[in-house]
Amino acid sequence: MVFRPRPNHPYAHAARFPDEGPVDIGSILPGEGPIEIEIGPGRGGFLFERAAAAPESRLLGLEIRLKWSSIVDDRLKKQGLGARARVLNADAREALSRLGPDASIDTFFMHFPDPWWKKKHAKRLVMGPGLLDSIARLLRDGGAFYVQTDVAERAEMYEAQVGAHEAFEPSGDEPGSARMVENPYNARSPREHHAIADGLPVTRLRYRRRPRVSA
C-alpha cells in the first residue's frame, strides 16, 4: 500500500502516480522515443546509468517508498533529465493496471525484487499474476521484460511464473532459455554492482512479448 503523507510531511511534495482512473503514459512522459519502466528503482542508480546509456529513451520508475521516489525524481530534474526520466510514488501492481495505452512500452525492468521471506509477508511480493498481466498488456510485441536476482529460489520462482504466462517467451542467451550471463543494458542497479564486487552469482532473465493474434 502506498503511504499517503500529511501536508506537513517532509516528502509531501513528492510526485505521485494519479490516484484514480486510467492514466496515459504520454501525460507522464510526453515526447518521442521508446518508453522503459523500472519497477522499484530504489535509490535510482540504474535509472541514471540507463539515462546515459539510452539517451533516446523515456524512462519511468515506479517506487513504493515515498522518500526515495521523491529524492530520485528531484535528482533527475536537477541533472536536467526530468523531461524524459521520472520517478513516481506508486505501488506498481496497482499503477500498471491503470496505465495505458496497450502495447506502448518497450522494456520493463525489475532488479532484485521481493526481499520478503516470511509467509506473512507473501502479500508484499511484487511478482504475481496481476503484475504479469499488466506488463503483458502494456508491452509492445517483441518488447522485453528483464528480471535479475541474486537469490536462487527467487530466480526459480520467477522462471516458473513468467514461463507459465502465455504472453511471454524466453529470450536469453540460448534458445528456449530466459537466462543471460551478462546484463545487456549498459546500466546496473546498486545491488548488481555490489553483487559483482562481492563475487555473488546473479541470475538474469529476459523474456519477450509474443506477437498478439489479430481477431
Image (cartoon, rainbow, N blue to C red):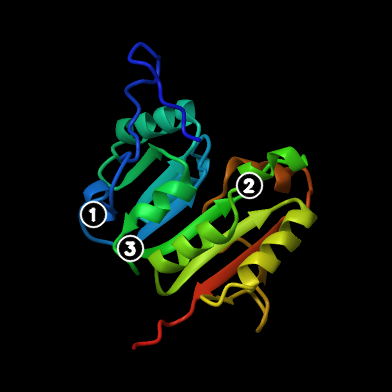
- Which residue position holds label 1? 26
Up the image or down, 200 lies above or below 57; here it is above
Residue 136 against residue 2 in the figure, above or below: below
Closer to the chain start, of discs 1 and 3, is 1
* Residue at the top extreme, as displayed: 8
| Residue that appears at 33% across and 63% down | 34
Residue 208: tell me if it is visible.
yes
Residue neighbourhood size for the residue with mark 3, other residues' Cα within 10 Å, grouped as few (<14), some (14–19), many (≥20): some
**Marks 3 & 2, CB-CB < 8 Å contact:** no
Q: Position of residue 6 (x, y in %)?
A: 37, 16
The answer to whether residue 144 is above or below residue 42 is below
The secondary element bearing badge 1 is classed as: helix
Residue closer to the observer: 171 or 199: 171
Q: Is residue 8 above or below residue 58?
A: above
In the picture of the structure, the residue carrying the numbered disc 2 is 125
Q: Residue at x 51, y 56 (%)?
A: 109
Q: Amino acid at mark 2?
A: Leu
- Of callouts 1 and 2, which one flags the residue occurring earlier in the amino acid sequence? 1
Mark 1 closeness class: few <14, some 14–19, many ≥20 residues within 10 Å: few
**At label 1, which amino acid type do we have?**
Gly
Query: Which of the two labelled residues, at mark 3 and mark 2, occupies the earlier sequence position?
Result: 3
Q: Secondary structure at mark 2?
A: loop
Q: Position of residue 81 (x, y in %)?
A: 31, 41
Q: Residue 120, located in which quarter of the rendered image?
A: top right
Q: What is the number of the mark on residue 34?
A: 3
**Is 86 or 141 nearer to us in this picture?**
141
| Residue shown at the point (63%, 44%) measured from the top left | 123
